[in-house]
Structures are given as C-alpha cells and as structure tokens.
Image (cartoon, rainbow, N blue to C red):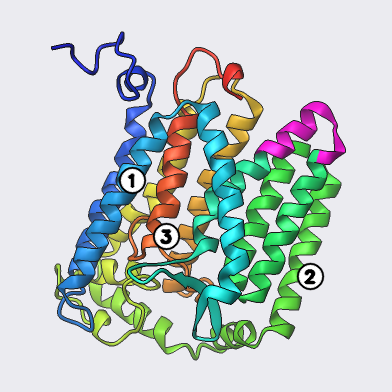
Amino acid sequence: MKNKLFRDDQSLLGSNWYILSKKLFIIPFILSFIGILAIYSLIGTEYSILLIIKHIIFLSISLFLLIFLSLLPKNELRKILNFMCIFFILLLLFVPVLGYEIKGATRWISFDFISIQPSELLKGPLVCMFSWFCYLYVKTNNKLYLFICLFMIGTVTLLLLNQPDIGTLLVYISIISLILILYFRNLKLFILLGFLGIFFLLIAYFFFDHVAYRIDNFLDGNNSQVSKSLSAIKTGGIFGVGLGEGQLKYSIPESHNDFIFAILIEEFGVLFGLFVSFLYPFFFILARKSLLSPSNLFISNTIFSLCFLMCLQAFINIGSSIKLIPPTGMTLPFVSYGGSSMLSYAIIFGTVISFSKNEESTTNNS
C-alpha cells in the first residue's frame, strides 16, 4: 500500500505534508493540553464533569478544523475565509433578533444544543478579508477596494456597538489599525489612528456605563475579582500548590475563562505562568521565521496581524488577571473554556500555519 506521506501522493494530506512547517503545530497542542488541565481542576466547584466533557468535544472539533485549514492551498483558504467573513457578519446582523442577553449585553445566538458568539468567530476571517482588500488597493490603486474596507469595518463597528461589546470592538479597531499601518506605512496615518483610538476610548467611557464602571473600579482598586486573582497568584508562589488544590476557583465567578490564568499560576506556579504567557509570542516568532524571504505582501502582513491578534488577546486576559488592565471578559486563546473562542483560534492558528507553508513560490497563491 502506498504510504500516504510519500511526496508523490496527491491527497490533501500527502500533497501538503512536506511543505507544512510542522513545528507550528506544537504551540496550539501544548495550549490545548494546558487548557484540559485547567478545566479539569474546576471539577467539584460550581462546575461538574460535564464541563470538561464539553471542553474536550469543542477542542477536538477545533483541532480537526485547525489541521484541515492548515492543509488547504493558500488561495483556496483565502476564498473560504472571505466566505466565512461574510457569513459571520450576516450572523452579527441577526444577533439583536435571535440572541439572548447576558449581563446587559446581547452577544450570543442559541441553536438549541449550542450557543455561538459571531463576533468571536469573525476575528480571523475579518482580518484576512480586510488585509486582502488592502492588498488589492495597494496593488491596483482602485478606490473601490478601499471603500469595501471602510464599509466592512463601519458595519462591524455599528453591530458591536449595538450589542454592546466594547472590549471586542477595541480589539478589532487595534488590529484593523495595524493592518492599515502595515500596508500604507504612513506616519500621519499612524498619528491619526492614535488620536482616533484615544477619542473612541473617551466615547466608550462617557457613553457606556459598564465601561466606566470597570475603569473606575480598576483605578480605585475596588475590583474583588482582581484582588482574589492576585491573592491566588501570591499563594501559588514559584511552583504552585498542585493540580486541583487551588482555592480561587471556589470564590470567583467566570473562573473557567476570564481568570483561568490565575488558576493556572495558583496550582502550577509563577514559572509555569511565564511559560504559558511566552508560548504566544513564541508562536509569532516561529511563524515569521517560517516565511520565505521575500514573501508575498498579503501573506506576510496577514500572518503578522493574526499573530498579533492572538498575542493581544492573550495579553488582555493575562493583564486583567494581574491588574495591568481592567477586566474585559476575554478568553485566553486555546486555554479558556468556550466553543466559539476555540473555533475562532482554530481558524487563526490554521490560517497562519497554512500561509507559512514552505512553498517554492507564494505569488501564485495570492
């Protein structure tokens, strides 16, 4: 029987195996294992064994999606991501109608057996589609592509403001700004985007009560969740108290996603926490090193933006646990519980790995 890994094999796996940067799979698989440990430690609190069963099911689907997307040719993957982007934007349109409210915000759509968060799933596809139209504009100077870019981000901004989901919107604005800077490399644009970012923060603070509440509590040091998180980190020390022995999970709500990092440090120690936090920039470095030089502008800028998005969300989650920034409710990629989050980062990891393929030419696929 012919070996499926032979170079002359034309199947999806065989034809792509030798051009994949296989070391890039290491980081998401390590994060997956860490996530299983973290969720397992929550059993016996407010969560039953059903939590880890659901987590493993979501994780299995996500890893399958990651591997499948990483095997696709770049041009085909880009088309699929563009379709995903349009589909998830349409889902965002239906959130006010089909969604249900949690803590004053309507972000989720329920389909009987599963709930999804379209704004989370949209992250990777939107970055890729926005980057693609910026690339086309730079190459052709056709202002239609620039108009499409502005229309996309304007639509998503209005839909997220309507939920409201200010934290996710700030992440989108940051990544879109980065993409514009990467393509246009204009100092005036950089300064303008900086002022617009500050202006938006002020608008969010004065017009959204929950944003003002979180920022005020952060500045005053009155957030009990963050105080408990810091206490748990101090308790963990260098080497931690052991798997399942931490106490933070018994006293803090949303411990399975928002403060999963503090639980990891309490049970496994500060050194382990540093190891986890460095996995994200390390993946960034590996992805950049896997690119051919010179690489296609779209491929290079999209990989940079997706990796930055992943590192930014990890920083936000970790930063809120150690009182660097106000709590935002964002997950730790591929570690926290959450089907939408895991699927979202499966798309992102899979796209980065696919775009980093060591092919002889990148220009034919862009």
Q: Mark 2 or mark 3, which has the lower sequence index? A: 2
Number of callouts = 3
Residue 73 lies in the magenta-colored region = no
Q: Is residue 155 visible?
A: yes
Q: Residue at the spot x=42%, y=89% of the render? A: 224
Q: Is residue 239 visible?
A: no
Q: Mark 2 or mark 1, which has the lower sequence index? A: 1
Which amino acid type is marked by label 3? Ser
Front residue of this view, candidates 255 and 53: 53
Front residue of this view, candidates 266 and 86: 86
**Real-space Cα separation, disc 3 to disc 1, in angstroms:** 13 Å
Q: In the displayed structure, would residue 306 be above or below residue 171?
A: above
Which amino acid type is marked by label 1? Pro
Question: Which segment is the magenta one?
Answer: 132-144
What x and y, as percent, mark residue 71? Answer: 39, 29
- Helix, strand or loop under label 1: helix
Please tell me how crowded label 2 is: few (under 14), some (14-19), or many (20+) other residues with Cα within 10 Å: few
The quadrant of the image that shows the C terminus is top right
Please tell me how crowded label 1 is: few (under 14), some (14-19), or many (20+) other residues with Cα within 10 Å: many
What x and y, as percent, mark residue 178? Answer: 67, 48
Q: Mark 3 or mark 1, which has the lower sequence index? A: 1
**Real-space Cα separation, disc 2 to disc 3, in angstroms:** 29 Å
Give the label on residue 199, or none. Answer: 2
Residue at numbered disc 3: 341
Q: Nearer the viewer, mark 2 or mark 3?
A: 3
What x and y, as percent, mark residue 133? Answer: 71, 38
Please tell me how crowded label 3 is: few (under 14), some (14-19), or many (20+) other residues with Cα within 10 Å: many
Give the label on residue 297, or none. Answer: none
- Helix, strand or loop under label 3: helix
- Helix, strand or loop under label 2: helix
Residue at numbered disc 1: 28
